[in-house]
Amino acid sequence: RMKAKHNGKIDILRAAIKEFLEIAQRTGKGISKHQIAEALYIRHPDMFKSKEDARTIVRYATMSMGSISKKAKNQELADAFHLLAEPIKETDPTPYDIPLGYKKLLVIADIHSRFYDKKALYKAIEDGLKSNCQGVLINGDFMDFYQYSKFDKNPNIVADFASEQDWGVDLLSLLQSLFGVVFLKLGNHDLRRELMIQRLSATMPELQGYTSYQDYLFYEGSNVQFIEDYKHITFGKLNIMHGHEYPSNGIHIAYNRLNKTFDNVLSAHSHRGQSIIRQTINREVYGSWTIGCLCNLSPRYAPKNDWVHGYAIIERDNEGLFEVQNKIIRDEKLFYI
């Protein structure tokens, strides 16, 4: 009875499946049964009373495809996979490659907006200018978004953070005017605001698409290059990441990140300056550098720590060979690691 009842619809469906399979094979992208059902409903509203009705027919017909197909098993498998919805991809792991024209950059990180250390930040920027850096790379945690933290918050500090947006725009504008270009990679603190909006939008749809991080920090004439938190950066043969991508606490942070990346890597996030060089059995040399922070060294949540103020200046040639000057600031004096 079921077959007789749906016979006309199934004939239409089989023609549609053949059409969509040809499209899928040509494009290399799967077309789900849900998409086919929606197309059928749009094309034949007189035959399918609802999208759910069309989905029922699609499910019924595709379950019986194996018994009526005369194709080889490998073709059955290929067809079946073409009728699966495409996988969801949250991220694009392709690294962000700093354009070759930029040979020398100042790298700063962990400023944490209104928690910044004014003298340390000034010293880093001043040295970047003296060193003729062609741009500045902010390697994560430029902003802090304290008010969106999951930890207990001081209401007085939350009130002070009302000016955080203006602070961020002012500093980005200053860095652009001094260095010409600013590369800004998002860190875990930079994400706090957008993650909070995503959680709230589950029950408040009107928040979906609310001002993004880039829009939040936009200013007239801005050329800031924003880099997603999950992407790492390549600067010749040097890889750069914030550090939260490969969590590594403990004492030997630079060593641990070298062991996780198996490549040259410059990172931040841990607020400590370290350097380590290792040689393989074939005498290939790899290094790992972690840079200090430019924020307050005695925050309320961690008043006692081994953090240091620091930054780096990186330089490369046309072949991708690079130099890292990993610097620590102590009493307004510079030390090399």
Image: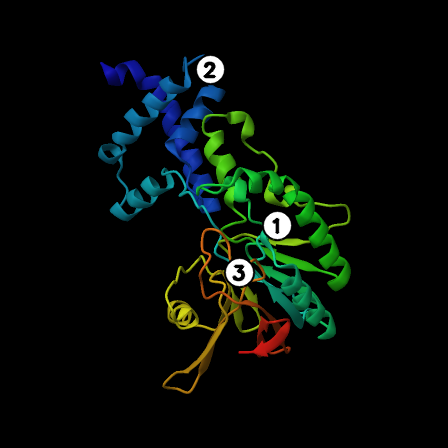
Res. 122 image quadrant: bottom right
Marks 3 and 2, how far apart at CA: 66 Å
For label 1, the residue is 114
Which mark is in front, 1 or 3?
A: 3
Side of 119 where 27 appears, left or right? left
Q: Is residue 103 left or right of residue 92?
A: right
Q: Which residue is mark 3?
A: 297
Give the residue at mark 2: 45
Amino acid type at mark 1: Arg
Q: Residue at x 38, y 67 (%)?
A: 260
**131 up-or-down from 14: above or below:** below
Precedes in sequence: disc 1 or disc 3: 1
Query: Viewer-proximal residue, 70 or 135?
Result: 135
Of mark 2 and mark 1, the one earlier in the sequence is 2
For the point 28% across and 25% down, the residue is 60
Q: Which of 292/48 is in front?
A: 292
User: Residue at (57%, 34%) from the top-left corner?
Assistant: 209
The amino acid pointed to by label 2 is: Pro
Q: Nearer the viewer, residue 251 or 4?
A: 251
Tag 1 secondary structure: helix
The disc label shown at residue 188, or none: none
Identify the element where label 3 is drawn: loop
Q: Tag 1: Cα neighbours inside 10 Å, few (<14), some, or many (≥20)?
A: many
Q: Nearer the viewer, residue 319 or 27?
A: 319
Question: Is there a contact, CB below 8 Å, between mark 3 and mark 2?
Answer: no
Q: Are marks 1 and 3 in contact (CB under 8 Å)?
A: no
Residue drawn at 44 percent across, 62 percent down: 305
User: Residue 120 at what x, y percent from top left?
Assistant: 63, 64
How is the rendered protein coloured?
Answer: rainbow
- Residue 12 pos. (x, y %): 39, 23
Q: Are marks 2 and 1 in contact (CB under 8 Å)?
A: no
